[in-house]
Amino acid sequence: MTSKEVTPARIGATLVPYGHAIGNEKWRGSEVAQGLHGKIQLHFEEALGLVDFQLPNKLCVLYISEADLVAGSAFKRRLVRIRNGASVHAIVIVERTRISDQYFSPVQKFIALELGMNLLPVANQSEAAQLIIQLVLGQSKEQSNPFIRKKRSQFTEPSVLNTIQQIPGVGKVKAMLLLQHFVSIHQLSNASIAQLEEVIGRGIAQQVHAFFTQKR
């Protein structure tokens, strides 16, 4: 494969061509890897560290399994390290099953509200593979189509909208207004009362500001 055959995107020190993904060696032979086989070009590396899959255009996937959720909060340290130290855009895929459902709500709040990361729930590894395929192929289409806007709000997933609605006083309408105005949860969580007031009024603005302030 030469540089003329694909357009690479640099993620850290790794070049990931469009239409390809790099998986952590621990996923070799897994149900996820089997689901990706034949749909995208998947390569494995041992040196991915905390990342489970690296995709084109500085996008990485972190996978939180049912076992991770049941085992406790150890996975949270990995998410915090990625959020604080990586220059990539991370998407967190979380297994929401009958067993792990009881742990999902607090994990959702931690990932989406406290860390400001995108969360995508899946029922199993097969569904996760389909999501990764969509992400990889979507990156390829965006790169080849100059008419597609590159910058998007991270608030495109229903799970993120639902999480924002759990802030006291914020219903669906106000949540959508906030997500349209602020391009990231990080920006939302650091907004002043005055900035929030412009979008949702002073009373609710104070509640939203207090919610994020007490999380720090």
Image: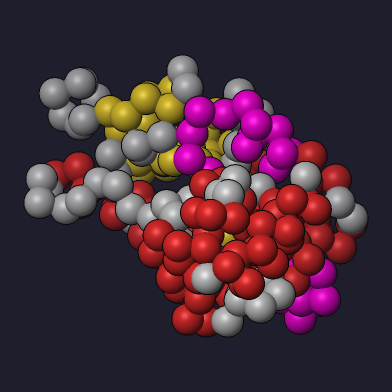
**In the image, is 154 to the left or to the right of 213?**
left
From the viewer's perspective, is residue 142 above or below residue 15? below
Q: What is the residue that sits farthest to the top in this orientation? A: 13
- The number of callouts visible is 0
**In the image, is 101 to the left or to the right of 82?**
right
Q: Position of residue 18 (x, y in %)?
A: 28, 39
**In the image, is 80 to the left or to the right of 9?**
right
Q: Position of residue 76 (x, y in %)?
A: 78, 46
**Magenta segment: does it hold 90?**
yes
Observer-nearest of 87 and 210: 210
**Magenta segment: does it hold 24?**
no
Observer-nearest of 75 and 106: 106
Magenta range is: 78-104
Q: What is the residue that sits farthest to the right in this orientation? A: 72
> Which image quarter holds the C terminus?
top right
Tell me what residue is drawn at x 50 percent, y 70 percent: 200
Could one spot residue 92 in this view of the protein? no
Q: Position of residue 143 (x, y in %)?
A: 20, 42
Which corner quadrant of the image does residue 78 belong to? top right
Q: Position of residue 51 (x, y in %)?
A: 60, 37
Observer-nearest of 63 and 25: 63
Tell me what residue is drawn at x 57 percent, y 29 percent: 86
From the viewer's perspective, is residue 81 above or below residue 177? above
From the viewer's perspective, is residue 160 above or below residue 191? below
> Which image quarter holds the N terminus?
top left
Could one spot residue 182 in this view of the protein? yes
Tell me what residue is drawn at x 75 percent, y 70 percent: 104
Which corner quadrant of the image does residue 55 belong to? top left
Q: How is the image coloured?
A: secondary structure
Observer-nearest of 83 and 185: 185
